[in-house]
Image: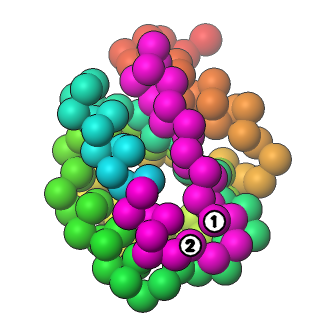
């Protein structure tokens, strides 16, 4: 299951992955995110992974193609997932990302949102 929420004023989206993701769900969210990117250019993404059981093989392929098309469209990505998922994601996708990527443990959703929304180029306090 995928849920998707937009924050137009922050040029950010929040995507929650839970259970198993179907190709239809992935394609629906991908269309929404592409429209958001078209409106805003560079966007920020918060991805929260909860009890993720995987995705259809076709959805996985669509995800790879989507990611390759939009590698330069993300300005900041925050990922909330267990450490095993961090390592998998980092080894597969992060090396190709031209944006800031930060990982957070489950339960750190608010810290991830705070980091995601922090102004780019602002000094840390």
Tag 2 residue: 21
The magenta region covers 1-28
Relative image position of residue 32 (x, y in whole percent): 38, 44
Question: Can see residue 98?
Answer: no
Residue located farthest toward the bottom when viewing the structure as drawn: 57
Residue 116: say if magenta.
no
Mark with earlier residue (1, 2): 1
Quadrant the N terminus occupies = bottom right
Q: Is disc 1 surrounded by few (<14), some (14 to 19) or many (20+) residues within 10 Å?
A: some
Contact between marks 1 and 2 (CB within 8 A): the answer is: yes
Quarter of image, res 8: top left
Taking the spot 31% from the left edge, 72% from the top edge, the residue there is 62
Taking the spot 23% from the left edge, 69% from the top edge, the residue there is 65
The answer to whether residue 28 is left or right of residue 18 is: left
Question: Can see residue 49?
Answer: yes
Q: Secondary structure at mark 1?
A: loop
Q: Is disc 2 surrounded by few (<14), some (14 to 19) or many (20+) residues within 10 Å?
A: some
Q: Secondary structure at mark 2?
A: strand
Quarter of image, res 26: bottom left
Taking the spot 45% from the left edge, 14% from the top edge, the residue there is 9
Q: Which mark is residue 1?
A: 1
Relative vertical location of residue 24 with respect to residue 74 in this rendering, above or below: below
Relative image position of residue 28 (x, y in whole percent): 42, 57
């Amino acid at each position: 299951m995928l849920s998707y929420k937009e924050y137009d004023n922050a040029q950010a989206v929040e995507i929650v992955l839970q259970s198993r993701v179907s190709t239809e769900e992935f394609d629906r969210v991908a269309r929404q995110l592409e429209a958001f990117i078209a409106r805003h250019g560079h966007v920020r993404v918060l991805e929260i992974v909860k009890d993720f059981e995987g995705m259809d093989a076709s959805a996985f392929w669509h995800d790879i193609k989507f990611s390759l098309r939009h590698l330069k469209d993300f300005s900041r990505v925050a990922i909330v997932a267990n450490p095993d998922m961090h390592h998998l994601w980092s080894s597969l996708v992060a090396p190709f990302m031209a944006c800031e990527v930060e990982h957070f443990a489950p339960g750190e959703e608010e810290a991830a949102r705070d980091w995601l929304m922090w102004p780019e180029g602002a000094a840390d306090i």
